[in-house]
């Protein structure tokens, strides 16, 4: 008996049934994945220090966050209108309530460049969001899954097939015991193969769709009642499909209606195809670019204050510093991308 065969036999003996099952599951998960599956999420900007905290921090945002350069005209208006703090408080209450006990679809929409992906990434990474979702899941195990659409990259990153594969991978990674029921054909094939022939199966997009249907069909069964799933989908406007964005909207709507234990948070530019969400969930939406003046003010202040020349001007008591901050914030109209470009120009001008 060769040393190679002996080594293989020893390895086989070391593999328990659980070990073989784990290998089969890992192979199926690898077959579901695709290159750069998380690239858009990874590339999305991380929120600037202390920005977007208002969406989750329960009445704990400091006073400085809302501090503005005095503006008598604006102050007179604010005597009659809700303040930004008031509006944030109302939006925060509704969003936290949706996370903790809501259902269906919550939508975040905004102009291009207004920070939708950054906010979605912030929420996905938030311990506070997970704490609220655990209140919703109760005795069930909480599963979160995400997909960030991206038109600039491969077809998979802007398609329904890419979303399905990514969500399958995320959900089954957190609940691997569901794999056998979701991929029964592939499971039986791998389990019947010799241990050394347990290889990554070829899983087509059609296979993935069938598997996703299998997963969702478990939504009201005893098995799936052990889980609650919250899905985050960013950039619905980046989706491309033969039937247009309505195909994606219908898919999301149908998924959300399957069970009270599946709900979905989406972000997008404003599109007519989002109308079904507006009708079904009129209170579960926010227009982000109308809510970020304080965030933009913080970004502008911090960026300019980091520049030595600007700090010198402040120490000299130059009133133009506050005027400049106010001007940039006022012209931004909620668009972070514009602010980023303008700040680069301003910082270069301060350097020169």
Image: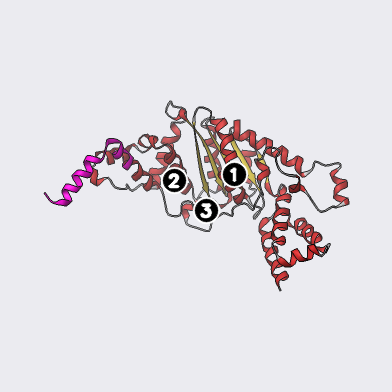
Residue 163: where, in percent of width, then height? Answer: 48, 46
Q: Residue at x 40, y 43 (%)?
A: 208
**In-image side of 184 versus 147 (left or right):** left
Q: CA distance from mark 1 to mark 3?
A: 14 Å
Q: Secondary structure at mark 1?
A: helix
Q: Quadrant of the C terminus?
A: bottom right
Residue 180 in the magenta stretch? The answer is no
Residue for badge 3: 42
Quarter assignment of residue 101: top right
Q: CA distance from mark 1 to mark 2?
A: 22 Å
Residue for badge 1: 123
Q: Which residues are magenta?
A: 1-23
State the residue lying farthest toward the top. Answer: 222
Q: Secondary structure at mark 2?
A: helix
Cβ–Cβ under 8 Å for marks 2 and 3: no
Eye-nearest disc, 2 or 3:
3
Q: Residue at x 56, y 52 (%)?
A: 238
Residue 64 shows in this picture = yes
Magenta residues, dominant SS class? helix
For marks 2 and 3 on the same chain, the one whose residue lies earlier in the sequence: 3
**In-image side of 43 versus 19 (left or right):** right
Figure colour scheme? secondary structure
Residue 119: where, in percent of width, then height? Answer: 62, 48
For marks 1 and 3 on the same chain, the one whose residue lies earlier in the sequence: 3
Residue for badge 2: 165
Cβ–Cβ under 8 Å for marks 1 and 3: no
State the residue lying farthest toward the left. Answer: 1
Q: Secondary structure at mark 3?
A: helix
């Amino acid at each position: 008996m060769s040393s190679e065969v002996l080594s293989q036999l020893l390895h086989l003996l070391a593999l328990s049934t659980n070990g073989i099952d784990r290998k089969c599951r890992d192979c199926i998960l690898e077959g579901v994945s695709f290159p750069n599956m998380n690239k858009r999420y990874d590339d999305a900007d991380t929120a600037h220090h202390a920005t977007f905290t208002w969406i989750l921090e329960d009445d704990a945002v400091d006073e400085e966050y809302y501090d503005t350069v005095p503006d008598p005209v604006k102050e007179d208006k604010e005597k009659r209108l809700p303040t930004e703090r008031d509006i944030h408080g109302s939006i925060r209450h509704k969003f936290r309530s949706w996370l903790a006990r809501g259902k269906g679809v919550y939508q975040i929409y905004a102009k291009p460049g207004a920070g939708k992906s950054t906010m979605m990434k912030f929420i996905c990474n938030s311990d506070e969001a997970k704490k609220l979702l655990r209140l919703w899941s109760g005795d069930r195990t909480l599963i979160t899954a995400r997909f960030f659409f991206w038109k600039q990259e491969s077809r998979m990153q802007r398609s329904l097939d890419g979303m399905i594969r990514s969500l399958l991978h995320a959900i089954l990674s957190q609940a691997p015991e569901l794999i056998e029921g979701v991929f029964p054909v592939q499971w039986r094939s791998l389990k019947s193969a010799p241990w050394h022939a347990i290889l990554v199966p070829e899983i087509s997009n059609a296979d993935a769709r069938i598997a996703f249907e299998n997963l969702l069909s478990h939504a009201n069964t005893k098995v799936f009642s052990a889980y609650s799933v919250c899905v985050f989908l960013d950039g619905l406007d980046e989706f491309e499909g033969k039937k247009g964005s309505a195909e994606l909207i219908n898919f999301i709507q149908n998924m959300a209606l399957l069970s009270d234990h599946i709900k979905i948070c989406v972000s997008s530019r404003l599109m007519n195809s989002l109308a079904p969400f507006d009708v079904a969930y009129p209170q579960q939406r926010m227009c982000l670019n109308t809510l970020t003046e304080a965030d933009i003010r913080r970004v502008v202040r911090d960026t300019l204050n980091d520049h030595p020349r600007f700090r010198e001007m402040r120490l000299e008591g130059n009133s133009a510093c506050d005027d400049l901050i106010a001007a940039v914030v006022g012209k931004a109209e909620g668009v972070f991308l514009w602010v980023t470009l303008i700040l680069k120009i301003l910082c270069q001008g301060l350097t020169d």
